[in-house]
Image: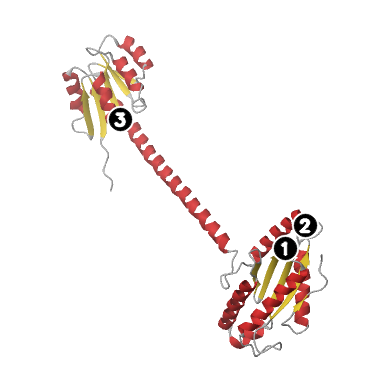
Amino acid sequence: MSEKKIINILIVDNEPENILAVENLFENSDLNIVKAASGEKAVDLMLEQDFALVFLNAVMQKTEGFDTAKSMRRSERTRHIPIILLIPAGIEKEFTLKDYRSGVVDYLYKPIDPVVLKSKVNVFIELYTQKELLNKQTAMLLRKDEELRELRGQLEELKRKLEEHSFYDSLTQLPNRRRFKEFLNLEWRRCIRTGGVVSLVMIEIDFFKQFIDHYGRQAGDDCLRKVAEALADSAKRVPDFVVHYSGGNFAVVLPETNNDAGVFVAERVRENIELLNIPHWQSPAANHVTISLGIASIVPSTDSSPSDLIDAANTFLDEAKKWGGNQVRTLEPLI
């Protein structure tokens, strides 16, 4: 449980008997009475402590009440503290008008009526309490807002990492189909600007379903990892882009590579997979894992699209599979 905050009331008067009279009215309350014998001392105290209310004598030996009130209003810290002016009998009209203009919010006549005094104090204490509660709630909301901003920042970072992660296949550690399409679109636009050529190799592990049915899913995952590593090693140039397309399917984007050079790369890829010598006794193509490859090449233009290149490479891949697998197929290049 939090400690109850002390509520301070400041009495500013150079006549001790006046201070004592007000102080005695609140001796049994939870209020803390602070005394000042001059306006200068009062302002100093208000800069050091928080006050719910100030009682200010209208007439003191050196400084009139409205001058002190004006001094209080010059500071941002003290300008909103309510001031009740204590007015000697017989001069209330003169000081009432003057001190309202200087920032006084209320006044009491001397001799002070205890009932009126307590009533006014209760009103201002309630206002002070509500203000403090509002300040606490505002501070709490500001903290919550800051926490939300931090949380939003963390979520944005997490989203960025997830999006980055979503471009890669967790099994093979290769870029995935989503990243493949993004890369090919970028390469396509670049070639339109430069007039360059791009080749695409579509790859499928021969009879991969039969491999999994016979050797099991774990063996299938191990096979995919080994094939992926061999493909990445085979496409040695920096711009070459190897992806795990889906299941037992892969793709290699070969920027600035014509069809003849693309066929050379594809044959090297095929041979490297054979060199892995992964047993596959259920394959009609060989007693080890092999791949089929289809390659297409094109000079991108505004009249064509990446899907044209993908469709052509897939057509050639289907031809390779149709003729028994473990081979590279291509037709006349599209350039």
Pick the front one: 167 or 132: 167
Seen in the picture, residue 17 relative to 323 is either above or below; the reply is above
The amino acid type of the residue labelled 1 equals Glu
Q: CA distance from mark 1 to mark 2?
A: 10 Å
Residue 122, position as x, y percentages in the image:
30, 30
Q: Quadrant of residue 278?
A: bottom right
Q: Earlier in the sequence, mark 1 or mark 3?
A: 3
> Which image quadrant: the C terminus?
bottom right
Seen in the picture, residue 334 relative to 287 is either above or below; the reply is above
Q: Which residue is mark 3?
A: 52
Q: Can residue 269 be seen in the rendering of this structure?
A: yes
Q: What residue lies at 26% left-to-right and 31% top-to-bottom? A: 8
Q: CA distance from mark 3 to mark 2?
A: 79 Å
Seen in the picture, residue 69 relative to 325 is either above or below; the reply is above
Q: How many marks?
A: 3
Q: CA distance from mark 1 to mark 3?
A: 79 Å
Pick the front one: 193 or 74: 193
Contact check, label 1 and label 3, Cβ < 8 Å:
no
Q: Earlier in the sequence, mark 3 or mark 2?
A: 3
Pick the front one: 148 or 89: 148
Q: Earlier in the sequence, mark 1 or mark 2?
A: 2
Q: Which residue is mark 2?
A: 195
